[in-house]
Amino acid sequence: MAATHLETRAALIVVDLQKISASFPTAHPCAEVVVNPARLANAFRAKDPPAIPVNVFGAAPGRTEQSRSAASLPPDCSDLLATLNQRSQDRLVSKRTSSAFTRTELADDLNSAGVTQVVACGVTTNIGDEST
C-alpha cells in the first residue's frame, strides 16, 4: 500500500536488514536494495519519529521442521547491516518468529511512544515484512 500521508507520530520498522538476510539470493542485488530502507530510516530519524530496526535471532521455540540449526549460523548473522547506520536512539527489536510483534515488546513500545501509524520495510518482504 502506498503511503500518501505520514502522521506526526509515525514509526518506521526496518525488518531483517541483517547480515544473514543479505546472504540470501534475491531478485535484485541486495547491496542496491538495502539503500532504500537506510534512506527511509535516516529520513524518519531527522523528523524524530522512531526508526526501529528488527533482526531475527534464533528460531521460534518448539519449531523443529527447519533443517538448519541456529548453532550452525555464524555468530554475527543477526548483526544489522552497516548500511542501516544504527543509532544509539534506535530501539532494536530481536525476534524469533516471522513477525516482529510476536513474543516481543514492539507493540507496547509503539503504544507507549504514542505511535499512530507504522511504515514497514525490509529485504525479506515475503516473510518478515508481511508477517509484521
Image (cartoon, rainbow, N blue to C red):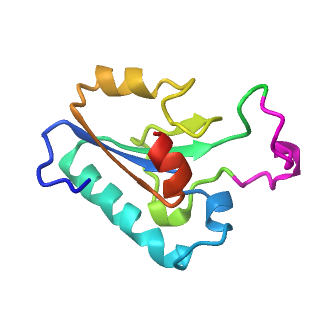
Q: Is residue 99 left or right of residue 72?
A: left
Q: Is residue 43 left or right of residue 71?
A: left
Q: Is residue 104 left or right of residue 51?
A: right
Q: Residue at x 53, y 26 (%)?
A: 104
Residue 45: image x %, image y %? 28, 51
User: In terms of depth relative to the viewer, which is nearer, 98 or 36?
Assistant: 98
Q: Residue at x 63, y 60 (%)?
A: 21
Q: Residue at x 24, y 42 (%)?
A: 49
Q: Magenta stretch: give its range.
A: 63-77
Residue 132: image x %, image y %? 46, 39
Q: Residue at x 56, y 61 (%)?
A: 81
Viewer can see residue 16? no
Per the image, is 64 magenta?
yes
51 relative to 114, above or below: below
Tell me where residue 115 sits by quadrant: top left
Viewer can see residue 97? yes
Per the image, is 3 magenta?
no
